[in-house]
């Protein structure tokens, strides 16, 4: 789900390394012992052999035996190591080697559609009567079918990580986009007023089947599937819908009148001379946005779109109805972000293409602040090692202004799937700050990275960007 136009964003590890903790430590007894038969070329290099090779060649050598979905390590000629940990998995071991994750959809021999390589398993319908999507993660699964009003799905058109099922209702397409963690978004594209008036859109009941997880929704509409240990395996933020209005076409209406500022309005608004328009990824500048009520009843996830947004005179079509499902329950690391405009919505392990959000969004209602939280696992090899230095990297992919402002890094209490704007962890101490601005016109500015010290990224309360 993409609740707002592009505010200052951080790229996710799914696309480029959402954030990585790099630690350099001297070799100590805490490091792994050499593997037996160290002469065997079939065995991946451990720390001892990689360090020896690095010192002999004068070049950095990867510690292949240390590689995991989130961790990589290299040995340096001076006898030190650098361990890099991504917040979200960036690779997977498949067919005898580590491969980068790839959400590009392919057609399988059994007629289904699936991403090339994802952390958790994801299978999409290739058309017909089967489920729309099945997510699987180590013996736990969630299957989602389409509402009875849609019935049999047509064969989809594939484009990268997206599959479009045309005409699932008159004037309505269904676009499903996979992500590299094994989650997906499903967006109903309502093309015109006649399509919006279809009673089938009053309530959309998606039949579900689960294995070793229990589905539930909370009062805000957040959807969770938890295992017997109460760990969130699959989740979906409270869904939203939006239309295609722009700042030029948007008219005052009950849809936008209720979206007043939820943050300080004395701050300088961003330059909107280069506005983004609505699409299946997110609302554009000026779009009318409304929540979609979500409940879990009798085995169905029931979505109730906002009737006013579907039919208001000020609505500009197409209208997009978007629930997004995340699948990242099997990782020790965690990430989320919070949004003051939707204080009860959980964006737990959000893997949408727009990434995580940080800062103040002050150019369109609902004005709001966003904060990003990350949790990194402490690798056992660090215990007993001498830490020379550590760095936290977060790549800013978009900002509403070219004026550099401060991004702060804070240590906080822990996060979980219940973390929302209204339920944030306590802040302990500030660990660093970086003043940057990527801007909204890539050719005008080079890409910059915010590099400070470990854990939670929080925008400066004084700048409001």
Image (cartoon, rainbow, N blue to C red):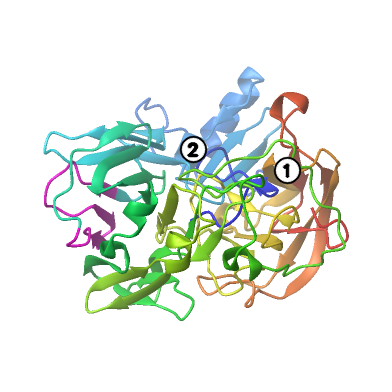
Q: Residue at x 55, y 50 (%)?
A: 283
Name the residue carrying label 2. Answer: 46
- The answer to which quarter of the image holds residue 147 is bottom left
Name the residue carrying label 1. Answer: 399
The residue lying furthest to the front in this view is 313
Compare residues 74 and 34 and report the one nearer the observer: 74
Magenta segment: 122-149
Q: Is residue 428 visible?
A: yes
> In front of the other: label 2 or label 1?
1
Q: Residue at x 20, y 55 (%)?
A: 150
Asked if residue 140 is positioned above or below residue 452 in the image, the reply reads below
- Residue 105, how many percent across, how many down? 31, 35
Helix, strand or loop at mark 2: loop
Q: Residue at x 20, y 46 (%)?
A: 125
- Residue 62, how many percent across, how many down? 54, 31
- Residue 219, how many percent across, how many down? 46, 81
Q: Is residue 202 left or right of residue 361?
A: left
Q: Is residue 184 visible?
A: no
Q: Is residue 67 left or right of residue 450?
A: left
Compare residues 276 and 402 and report the one nearer the observer: 276
Helix, strand or loop at mark 1: loop
Compare residues 99 and 339 and report the one nearer the observer: 339
Asked if residue 193 is positioned above or below residue 218 in the image, the reply reads above
Q: Is residue 153 magenta?
A: no
């Amino acid at each position: 789900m993409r609740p707002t136009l592009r505010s200052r964003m951080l790229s996710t590890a799914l696309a480029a390394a959402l954030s990585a903790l790099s630690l350099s430590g001297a070799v100590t007894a805490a490091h792994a012992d050499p593997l037996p038969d160290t002469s065997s070329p079939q065995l991946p290099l451990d720390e001892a052999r990689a360090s020896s090779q690095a010192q002999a060649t004068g070049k950095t050598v990867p510690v292949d035996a240390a590689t995991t979905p989130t961790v990589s390590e290299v040995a340096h000629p001076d006898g030190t190591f650098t361990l890099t940990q991504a917040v979200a998995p960036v690779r997977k071991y498949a067919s005898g080697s580590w491969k980068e994750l790839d959400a590009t959809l392919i057609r399988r021999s059994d007629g289904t559609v699936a991403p090339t390589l994802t952390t958790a398993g994801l299978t999409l319908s290739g058309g017909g009567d089967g489920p729309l999507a099945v997510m699987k993660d180590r013996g736990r699964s969630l299957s989602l079918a389409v509402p009875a009003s849609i019935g049999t799905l047509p064969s989809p058109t594939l484009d990268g990580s997206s599959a479009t099922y045309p005409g699932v209702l008159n004037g309505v397409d269904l676009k499903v986009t996979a992500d590299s963690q094994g989650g997906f978004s499903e967006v109903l594209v309502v093309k015109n007023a006649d399509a919006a008036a279809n009673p089938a859109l009053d309530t959309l009941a998606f039949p579900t089947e689960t294995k070793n997880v229990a589905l539930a929704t909370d009062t805000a509409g957040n959807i969770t599937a938890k295992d017997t240990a109460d760990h969130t395996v699959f989740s979906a933020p409270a869904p939203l819908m939006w239309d295609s209005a722009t700042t030029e076409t948007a008219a005052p209406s009950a849809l936008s009148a209720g979206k007043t500022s939820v943050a300080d309005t004395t701050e300088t608004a961003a330059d909107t001379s280069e506005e983004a328009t609505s699409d299946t990824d997110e609302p554009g500048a000026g779009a009318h946005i409304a929540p979609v009520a979500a409940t879990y009843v009798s085995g169905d996830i029931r979505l109730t779109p906002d009737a006013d947004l579907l039919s208001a005179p000020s609505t500009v079509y197409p209208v997009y109805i978007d629930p997004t499902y995340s699948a990242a329950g099997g990782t020790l690391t965690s990430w989320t972000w919070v949004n003051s405009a939707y204080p009860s919505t959980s964006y737990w392990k959000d893997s949408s293409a727009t990434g995580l959000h940080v800062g103040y969004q002050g150019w369109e209602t609902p004005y709001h602040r966003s904060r990003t939280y990350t949790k990194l696992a402490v690798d056992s090899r660090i215990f007993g090692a001498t830490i020379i230095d550590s760095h936290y990297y977060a790549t800013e992919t978009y900002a509403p202004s070219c004026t550099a402002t401060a991004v702060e890094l804070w240590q906080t209490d822990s996060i979980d799937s219940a973390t929302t704007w209204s339920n944030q962890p306590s802040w302990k101490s500030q660990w660093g700050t970086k003043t940057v601005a990527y801007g909204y016109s890539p050719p005008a500015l080079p890409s910059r990275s915010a590099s400070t010290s470990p854990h939670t990224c929080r925008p400066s309360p004084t700048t409001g960007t």
